[in-house]
């Protein structure tokens, strides 16, 4: 990254992220605003570097906006996984839920099955063979 891009990142993009992230982003788990600002700054730096390497002109507002969208959707600078149950993307999507081991255990079977299983949503899964369909369950 060039010194000019670093200056734009520091003087124009980071202040926009600092003002918008605490108001617009949902925190997952132990995340806080400062951590998300750092993560969005890393995403913005990567975007600036890639745009500069490609020879494209971008505005600081666009970089800040798309960095904010990355963080809001649960994508992080270290990667985003849709199969990791502890990832912020899966928790924001609602397909997983973490429970504390210190929560009291349910005494009856019905409450126990509700607290340990995920919501069962039925969806159509398209197999690779034409004309065949079947219904599967996904947690």
Image (cartoon, rainbow, N blue to C red):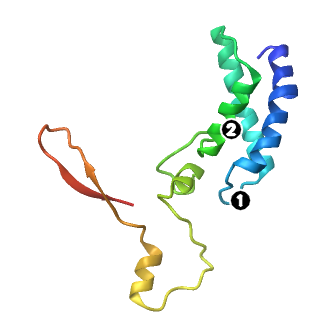
Q: Quadrant of residue 132?
A: top left
Tag 1–tag 2 contact (CB < 8 Å): no
What residue sits 58% from the left and 85% below the top?
104
Write down the quadrant of residue 37 in the picture: top right
Please name the residue shown 53% across and 85% down the image: 105
Q: Is residue 4 left or right of residue 139?
A: right
Of callouts 1 and 2, the N-terminal one: 1
Please, what secondary structure does the residue beneath circle 2 have? helix
Tag count: 2
Please provide percent x and percent y for residue 133.
17, 48
The answer to whether one can see residue 49 in this image is: yes
Q: For the view shown, which residue lies furthest in the bottom direction?
A: 107
Q: Residue at x 14, y 38 (%)?
A: 129
What mark, if any, has residue 68 been given in the picture?
2
Q: CA distance from mark 1 to mark 2?
A: 19 Å
Q: Is residue 52 above or below residue 38?
A: above
Q: Residue 131 at what x, y percent from top left?
A: 11, 41
Q: Is residue 65 left or right of residue 131?
A: right
Q: Position of residue 54 (x, y in %)?
A: 63, 10
Residue 135, compared with residue 99, is above or below; it is above
Asked which quadrant contains residue 13, the reply is top right
**Residue wearing tag 1:** 30
| Residue found at the very far top of the displayed protein | 55
Q: Which mark is residue 115?
A: none
Q: Nearer the viewer, mark 1 or mark 2?
A: 2
Residue 77 is at least partly visible in this image? no
Report crowding for label 2: few under 14, some 14 to 19, many 20 or more residues within 10 A (C-alpha).
many
Position of 112 compared to 16: left or right? left
Quadrant of image for the C terminus: bottom left
Q: Residues within 10 Å of mark 1 (few under 14, many from 20)?
A: few
Q: Secondary structure at mark 1?
A: loop
Provide residue 120's location: percent of width, then percent of height. 36, 65
């Amino acid at each position: 990254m060039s010194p000019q891009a670093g200056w734009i990142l520091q003087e124009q993009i980071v202040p926009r992220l600092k003002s918008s992230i605490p108001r617009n982003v949902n925190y997952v788990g132990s995340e806080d605003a400062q951590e998300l600002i750092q993560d969005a700054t890393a995403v913005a730096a990567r975007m600036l570097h890639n745009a500069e390497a490609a020879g494209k002109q971008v505005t600081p507002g666009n970089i800040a906006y798309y960095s904010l969208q990355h963080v809001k959707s649960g994508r992080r600078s270290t990667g985003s996984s849709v199969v990791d149950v502890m990832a912020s993307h899966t928790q924001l999507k609602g397909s997983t839920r973490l429970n504390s081991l210190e929560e009291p255990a349910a005494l009856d079977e019905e409450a126990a099955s509700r607290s340990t299983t995920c919501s069962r949503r039925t969806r159509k899964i398209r197999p690779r063979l034409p004309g065949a369909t079947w219904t599967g369950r996904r947690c």
